[in-house]
Image (spheres, helix red, strand yellow):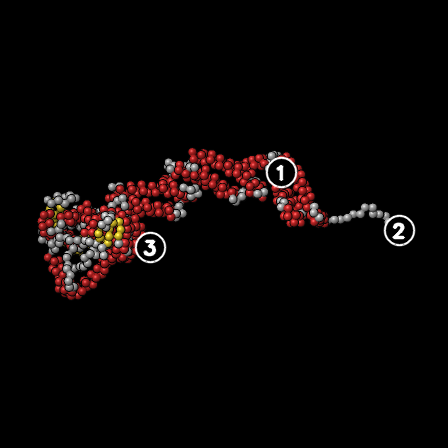
Amino acid sequence: MRFMRFTITTPVVLVSKSSIVSGICRNAYNMVLHKFGEKLYSGLVSTMTSHLKEIAKSIEAAQGGLFLEELNRKWAEHNKALQMIRDILMYMDRTFIPSTHKTPVHELGLNLWRDHIIHSSKIQKRLQDTLLELVQHERTGEVINRGLMRNVIKMLMDLGSSVYQEDFEKPFLEVSADFYRLESQQFIECCDCGDYLKKAEKRLNEEIERVSHYLDAKSESKITNVVEKEMIESHMHRLVHMENSGLVNMIVDDKYEDLGRMYNLFRRVPTGLALIRDVMTSHIREIGKQLVTDPERLKDPVDFVQRLLDEKDKHDKIISSAFNNDKTFQNALNSSFEYFINLNPRSPEFISLFVDDKLRKGLKGVTEEDVEIVLDKVMMLFRYLQEKDVFEKYYKQHLAKRLLSGKTVSDDAERSLIVKLKTECGYQFTSKLEGMFTDMKTSQDTMQGFHAAVGAEITDGPSLTVQVLTTGSWPTQSVTTCNLPPEILGVCDKFKTYYLGTHTGRRLSWQTNMGTADLKATFGKGQKHELNVSTYQMCILMLFNNADRLSYKEIEQATEIPASDLKRCLQSLACVKGKNVLRKEPMSKDIVEDDAFYFNDKFSSKFYKVKIGTVVAQKESEPEKQETRQRVEEDRKPQIEAAIVRIMKSRRVLDHNNIVAEVTKQLNSRFLPNPVVIKKRIESLIEREFLERDKTDRKLYRYLA
């Protein structure tokens, strides 16, 4: 018989954790099911409260840097336990709590943590001070544990937005405002504008980065508003006007990076961009006013316009590269240029002279793209002009000279500018300019017919090329015709006979002031040259075929060239070094009536062909300027009257002020009509019975059909 060596006195039962949880869940379920939910809920509150009080003591006891770590660890444990409790009491959470309107388990756990931990009298202020102190350390360049900060801040956010805002965000913003108020004052005292803006930008970026690492995203706008107010808005006037480094200095010195930084920072505050725009506008208007009113700079019209273009390019670049192509800044720039360009009444003339210079020689050898760029810049200045019709007058004169002398760089460039002008101002503005090109082409066909018809008769005489200009299209004027040499006069008569014989009802008048001639001349020792001169100069030189010496009076009597033109021609022929085919006695730069002139046998040039220009100022003389202005004023009268009639025809009855406003609106694309002139044109139309005054109200006008 065998005996057992061992006997079992206490049974061992192995139970899994899940079995325990399942049992507890079943017990909790049964309690709720059997109407003991209130007891279960109150027991939960009591137990959690007691446990959290013990946790609070543990956190309070943590010293120094361990305080946040202990708080973070206990928070993680509490969250884990809270999750398990919610799973266990799931049935109560779903049935008993909604029916009794009690706080759900998870929310209850958060509220109890808030009340007994975060709002503990020994923890709340300490936590707030610790968090703000860490932010301060980071602002002064120290490295902090951002992960720990993120966890603690997230805990406050999980406890509710009011907890995060009251226990951290609100004091955080207050402390930040004090910090940046003090720091900005220190910076403004020791930094120039550019350095200050760099520091402000750096601080702003740091705060944005701080939010992204461990603060609520909603705090970004609030903390950036603090930085913007204390570092930018509070000092922006001082920054903009800072001596030697403010906005104007940045513009003058082309500091695009600093300007861009100022724009990006100032746009964050309500009136920041308006301040920059106003100061920039004042600066541009001031330098523009100096430019257009400086007597020294007005001596060279081409340089004058080039300076305008350089200033425009400079500020365009600033707006595009630093001010983000801001339309309000571009509008301010345009307004400024329009203001000061029109301060100089000769701006239309100068812009036309600039075009004339470029299309004569300035664009020689330049690519088509570069030509278009120059023409577009000219059109930009043209748009600023209030008196576009004055520009048209001068442009027509200069274009005529280019076409008749054959000195234009490119017909394509000429036509391209006319197309741009037509697009800007309409067909009527350019119709006469286009007529000039038509006349040039027609004249070529006319000359071919002339040479075919009478070429055999003039083979021994001088060759003649005539441009027939349509009256009205060209800026021709009644000029006293000079006495042409007999050789030329005979050929001219033949052309006149031919032309009038092929065209009925037309008249020809010779514009000798606009022609050119090529003369073959032989000087001492048989040296030969071909001289390119004006028609007036040709008439003078041909006199020396029959005389070695002629006085000013004799030349004037023989040619009947107007005195002002005669003096300029003689000055060109006798006083310009390298072009002096005549000698003058006494020798001086000016021509007077007592001078005598001699054929210069000793003239020599390394070139066979010698062009002798006429000495003439680029700008108009005062009498010429007054004459041009008078012609412009006369041309404006019918345009103003036509506008008045158009308006009254559609409105029938209108008062004086509204007529002036409507006329100004219609005509400001060509010129800015003077209200006094408008009133005179109204009176003229009344006299001619196009309009009448209303009998009951003398300020009203009525259209007479």
**Which corner quadrant of the image does residue 332 belong to?**
top left
Question: Of the residues under marks 2 and 1, which one precedes in the sequence?
Answer: 2
For residue 219, say whether it is visible.
yes
Q: How many labels does the image show?
A: 3
Residue furthest front in the image: 696
Question: Of the residues under marks 3 and 1, which one precedes in the sequence?
Answer: 1
From the viewer's perspective, is residue 606 above or below residue 245? below
Query: How far across and down, in percent of the image, does residue 603 sit?
Result: 16, 50
| Of labels 3 and 1, the one closer to you | 1
- Amino acid of disc 3: Glu
Identified at 16% across, 55% down, the residue is 511
C-alpha distance separating marks 2 and 1:
67 Å
* 397 relative to 248 in the view: left or right: left
Report which residue position mark 3 lands on. Answer: 369
Asked whether the residues under the numbered discs 2 and 1 touch, taking CB atoms below 8 Å apart as contact, a structural biologist would say: no
Identified at 45% across, 37% down, the residue is 230
Between residues 77 and 322, which one lies in front from this camera angle?
Answer: 77
| Of labels 3 and 2, the one closer to you | 2
Which label number is shown at residue 344?
none
Query: How far across and down, in percent of the image, does residue 41 sit?
Result: 67, 44
C-alpha distance separating marks 3 and 1:
78 Å
Which label number is shown at residue 2?
2
Query: How far across and down, in percent of the image, does residue 405 sit?
Result: 21, 55
Report which residue position mark 1 lands on. Answer: 116
The local secondary structure at tag 2 comes to: loop
